[in-house]
Each structure stands twice: as C-alpha cells, then as structure tokens.
Amino acid sequence: MTKSANNNVIVCDDEKNMRRLLQDVLAEDGWQVTPCASGEELVKLVESEKESYDAIVLDLSLPGMNGLEVIDKLRQMGNDSGLVVITAYGSVDAAVKAMSHGAVDFLIKPFDNARIKSALRKVRESKGLITDAEMSHPTLVGADNLPLPIVGRDPRLTDIFKTIRQISSLKTSVLIHGESGTGKELVAQAIHFNGNRRHAPFVAINCAALPETLLESEFFGHERGAFTGAHALARGKFELADHGTLFLDEVGDMPMSLQVKLLRVLQEQRFTRVGGEKEITVDVRVIAATNRDLHDAVRQKTFREDLYYRLNVIPITLPPLRERREDIQHLIEYFLNKFSKRHHIAKLKLSDAQLQVLKAYNWPGNIRELQNAIEKATVLQDINSLIAQAQGYSGGIGVPRPPRTGSDLPPTLQEPHRSASGDEYLLDLGTGGTIRELDSVASDAQRAAVIRALKICKGNKSEAAKRLGISYKTLFNKIDDLGIQISTNVE
C-alpha cells in the first residue's frame, strides 16, 4: 500500500458516539476520517482499494469478527496501515496481544483527546508522515519574545528559557521535574526544536503507560519471530529517534529490570533488538521527565542511583500553576484566543472579578486543567461553568450554583470562625468600606482549614492530609507556604 498524502484513517467502533468523537478529535489534527461499525465493514474498506489508509483505529470488542480476528485478517492481506487499538479496562491482555501482532499503540477506555492524538502521531512518525509544519516548534509567547511553547513571565520560567537556549544544541541529558499538567513535554519539545536536532525526529514514550512485558520491545524493537506474534521486524523508539531526541515521560515508573538496559544505552549508544544478535548504534539525545521525587526513589532503592545521575545532568524544575498565579491571566488569554479560533466561535470575555476567582483557584491539574476548562467554557459559551469549577462546584451546565451554607461546605471549611481556642479561624473579610483582595481571603481560608485539621488530628500530618483530601507532600508544602508554625498549641 502506498503512503497517502491525505493522512487517511479508518475509525472502527460499534459505538456511534465514540465514532463521532474520534472523527471530530482526529479531524483537528488533519486526519481524513472514514468511520465504520464492524470488523467485516473495515475489511471490505481495505479490500476495495478505493483509498489507501495510513492508520486504523480499531476497537477490540466488536460484534461478529472481533478486533484480534480483524488484525489477523489485515496482516494476511499484507496491509501495513499503522494500527492503534482501543480496549476496555480489564482487557489489557488482549491489547498486549494486539501489540505483539504489530499494533503501534493501545488505549484503555476512557481516554482523553490528547492520548488518541499522541497515538496517531506515533503512526505519522513510524510511517514518515510528519510534515515540515509539525516538525517546526510551536510559536507561542515566551520571555524576550523567544518562540517557545511555554506561556508565562514568571522569573522561574525566564530562567528555564535561558537554560533551554544554552543546552538546546548540546547532547547533554536533561531531567525535567514537575507535577502532572505543568508542561514537561512542551519544555522537552522546546529543547529539541530550538537546537541542531530540530530536523530529526522527536519521539516520546510514556514509561508508565505500557506493561513491563512490552516496554523493552517498545524501547529497542524486536526481530521477526522473537516471540509469539512477532510476524515482522519492528524498530523501537531508540531507532526511530536516531539523530534526534527521545523523550522518556514518567521515567520514575520504569521497572528496575529495564533501568539497567537503559543505562547501558545511555553510556554506549548501542543496543540489541529483542530476539536479535546484531548491535545497533544510534545517536540519540535523551530528555526524561517525572512527577516523582527520584532522589527519594533512589534512597528507597526503587530507582537506580547510577541511572539517576546519568539522566540528571541538567535538571529543570517546572513550578506548579498555583505558584505562578500572575501567569494564569496570560494563559487564560492565550487559551481563549486559541479555542475561539479553533472552533470558530466568539471569544469569551471575563470581568475583573471573574479573573480574580480564576487566579485564586489552585488548579491542581495545573495548565492541563486550565486549558481543558477554558476549551469547555468556550465551546459551551458558558463562563459560569468555568467560574463554578474554580469555586469548587461541580454542578451541571445551566444548574444554578446553590447558596453555600455551613452544611454543604467541605468539612474542613465548615464554620471556620468557631473554635474552642479563640479567633484563629476568624477570616477578616474587611469591615466598613474596605474589601479584602480575593487572593488573601483564599489564603486565609486555606490556612484556617489546615490549622483546624492539624488540631483535630492532634498534629498527625498524615491523618490531617487524608482529612483534607491532599497528599502528605502537598500538606507539608502548604504548611510552609502559608507560614503555619507547628507548635505544641497546634499539636
């Protein structure tokens, strides 16, 4: 089958709504989508040869001819479309089998839009369909007008921009630390696309997304006949990234058995495919990312110390969105413009008061959560839903926000002004003609809630974090950020 210039993809799923969703999502990335509802229909489409298909998105649970039977039929026909399979939670074994039969990636329902787009990008990379436009870095607003895919003017981001300029053309390993949703992959892309490897592949792999049994093959590829179902030679990520960059996302979740082999490749730039004997030499720059404390993982002996130091030559730490609140306004403006243009819809306008609410919210999902919230509000043309999310209300669209009373507030915030010990929980909202700024009110409310939880739990931070619905580490950071002094009075 010849390569198509039209990025044609078949989406095969027996659920009509899923077909429509995938059609809309993939169309955003320039795919020409042909939907079908059964395995038999898919086979007929391929047999007709009216179109050549670069990719196939296939649900494994189909009536009649199931997904694995479809895969076998396609391979018998000599079809070489890039295959992405979809499976329900609990059916991972079938997905693993599909991967051994040549599938490029698999997704477990439910999955987000970014995940399916990423899977289809793998197909483009493996089939050489990446366009020049896609290989050029995004031109978003950055410090000093530098065209980097990061929006913000926080001083810590300015330092990151400087680091990117310094290291982009070097081969040095980089380890990016940051919570989920802070933009670790965007920083990796900025390093790659602003350096001398920009015209070579940028290949990403999520080390937490695949079973251990598949990771080695994903990294290094396999020879034909290496294991049951290995009907053809498959190149791994290191080969695909030759002369370019390999981005290892969630590297802290990599099994120890693979860490040893990764260390060897980093040191020697050589490896052997699964089932093979010939050593393959590559020139790959590795950028890794994690939301875990790898130094702590080394102490707990769940991550190799030698690999940690090999990856952590240049460390970059991305601050969470709650620590760069002034950037929230810039991000909101950027996303409002982006999604109004993408969906050809009116741009929402926020009042100063609404903007202050959004800036006061902690955005636990960081930039990813903010982006999704802005897109949802733009599509639905509903500012109230956006504000309600920031205020912690999860009612449906069009449902008025009920008045907050003591009984429907979170337990740690109910009646904060009442305490046995006096006025620690009294929130000064301003008196007379004065009005407190919303940021300071929100901080005081959080401080009161943390102090109250610590008192109730008699200073037991683990229990207090559990009651507050946050991690121990987050509570520890809150105590420091909010200036809470732990004393015998609290404990």
Image (spheres, rainbow, N blue to C red):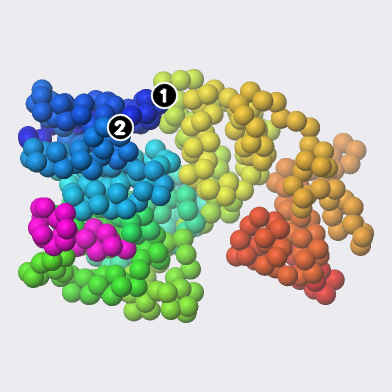
Q: Quadrant of the C terminus?
A: bottom right
The residue under label 1 is 343
State the residue at coordinates (81%, 63%): 456
- The residue lying at 58 percent from left, 25 percent from top is 382
SS at mark 2 in the image: loop
Picture coordinates of residue 365, whole percent (x, y): 53, 48
Q: Report the span colored magenta.
A: 212-233
**Is residue 430 positioned above or below 65 on the image?**
below
Q: Quadrant of residue 188?
A: bottom left
- Vertical side of 358 occupied by 203: above or below: below
Q: How many marks?
A: 2
Q: Looking at the picture, does residue 342 appear above or below residue 252?
A: above
Q: Quadrant of residue 311?
A: bottom left
Quadrant assignment, res 118 = top left
| 410 lies left or right of 65 | right
Residue closer to the observer: 78 or 166: 78
Q: Is residue 140 left or right of residue 377?
A: left
**Marks 1 and 2, how far apart at CA:** 35 Å
Name the kind of residue labelled 2 in the image. Pro
Q: Quadrant of the N terminus?
A: top left
Given residues 76 and 339, the one toward you in this image is: 76
Could one spot residue 92 in this view of the protein? yes
Q: Is residue 447 magenta?
A: no
Query: Crowding at label 1, few (<14), some or many (≥20) Cα neighbours within 10 Å?
Result: few
Q: Closest to the observer: 128 or 95? A: 95
Query: Given the current orientation, which residue lies at the most extreme front position?
Result: 64
> Which residue is found at the position 41% from the left and 54% from the top?
184
The residue beneath circle 2 is 63
User: Residue at point 8% right, 70% down?
Assistant: 277
Q: Is 95 displayed left or right of 395 in the figure?
A: left
